[in-house]
Amino acid sequence: MNSPHKDHIPAVAVLAASALLAVAAISRAADQSPAPTLTSPASPQKTPSADGFIPRWLLLEPIGASGLTDSVVQTAVKKEYFPNQFTVVPHDGDQLTVGGAQLTWHAVDTTHYNVNLYHFAHALGKPTSDVLFWAVTVVNCPQEMRGVRLAIGSNAASVWWVNGKEVIGIYGDRQTVIDDGVSKRLTLNKGPNIVRAAIVNGGGATDFCARFLDAADKPLKGFTVSLAAK
């Protein structure tokens, strides 16, 4: 006589496997849910926040990197990952290959003062630890602005350039603090100015914030932000 359970084992196994697949599918969907603090730009230009923070950026999907000390971060950000990485102003959806992996640039607006890179990467199913993020934006000034300073914060280390010149870097395993690093005084040109950053995260949360301070060290707000240099 056949065992009453024998004929049911395959069916049970199939149901269990189906359940596991369903859970995995739900998990993948959750990993790729929209970033809660980031939205797609809905207009050609955007103004800074009430406190002067730059809300619009082009972000490249993360590149593997490790180490947060000055020398390690400087070596990491100076490595050539893709052509013209210190001059290119990419477009939303542009793709490139780094280390055999295809990465995409994404245009984002943040709903907060900071740009949450953990939300950005997690929503795409990308790694958030031991990674380097590239960020680019275009600050459009109605006239030349002298004596301003770039003020930034990041979790963790970051290096920043304005119009191709490195102006500030902060290092180590740190939390994002407003105006944690402040550049020397510089001049923003009339018209487009390119702000570029490389943020390196070790583990856990990761984000950054940036604004310009005027000659009186007050938040600069008389400009717009766009994603094109022309």
Image: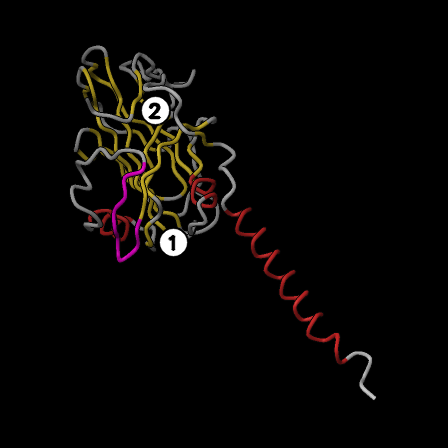
Q: How far from the left and from the top, in percent, is residue 16?
A: 67, 66
Q: Amino acid at mark 2?
A: Arg
In percent of the image, x 18 and y 39: which residue is there? Answer: 86
In percent of the image, x 47 and y 43: which residue is there? Answer: 123
Mark 1 lies on a secondary structure that is loop
- Considering only vertical position in the picture, is 29 above or below 136? below
Name the residue carrying label 2: 211
Q: Name the quadrant containing residue 220.
A: top left
What stretch of residues is rendered in magenta?
A: 93-102
In percent of the image, x 43 and y 30: which residue is there? Answer: 114
Name the residue carrying label 1: 130
Judging depth in this view, the residue of 89 and 185 nearest the camera is 89
Specify whether residue 195 is painted magenta. Answer: no
Mark 2 lies on a secondary structure that is strand
Dot 2 or dot 1: first in sequence order is 1
The Cα atoms of the two marked residues, 2 and 1, are separated by 26 Å
Q: Chief secondary structure of the magenta span?
A: strand
- Considering only vertical position in the picture, is 36 above or below 71? above
